[in-house]
Amino acid sequence: MLKHRGFPSRLTGTDFQFTIRRDNKKGATPLTARERYADRRPADRRADAAFMEALWTYFGDEPFERGNLDAGRLGWLFGREVIAAEDPFDPASYEALLVINEGVARANFPDAFGPQDDFDEQEDGF
């Protein structure tokens, strides 16, 4: 199992886990898309946004190996903001390749990508 060195292990000040310490001897927990309902707690929404920001900061638009990323946390983004980068895709593999679906991720978590430069709305001053 690849360990992503430097990737945050959790949301600071909470128990929302982003990575796992060691591989599961029974095999990797399969990735499954989890439904995000509108009535989720604000803390859960912050964790999703922080995880998305960490993924973008660490990997950008490049494919990445699942490695030690937490399956539960990935499940909240999987199938929407994070998608399979290979076909066939094995959801129960630590070596599975994923990629950020940038358009969907930017629409759902705009703050995770930092300030946007919108030159169309800037005035030239002339």
Image (cartoon, helix red, strand yellow):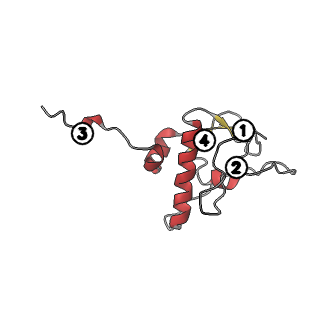
In which quadrant will I find the N terminus?
Answer: top right
What residue is disc 2 on? 31
Pick whichever of labels 2 and 4 is earlier in the sequence: 2
Q: Name the spot of residue 83 as percent of width and height, x first.
A: 60, 41
Name the mark on residue 96.
1
C-beta proximity under 8 Å, tags 3 and 4: no
Question: Which of label 1 and label 3 is nearer to you?
Answer: 3
Nearer to us in this view, 51 or 72: 51
Pick whichever of labels 4 and 1 is earlier in the sequence: 4
| Left or right: 30 as drawn, with respect to 113 | right
Q: Is the residue 12 above or below the residue 41 in the image? A: above
Q: Residues within 10 Å of mark 3 (few under 14, many from 20)?
A: few
Pick whichever of labels 3 and 2 is earlier in the sequence: 2
Q: Amino acid at mark 4?
A: Ile
Mark 1, secondary structure of its residue = loop
Q: CA distance from mark 3 to mark 2?
A: 41 Å
Mark 4, secondary structure of its residue = strand
What residue is disc 4 on? 83
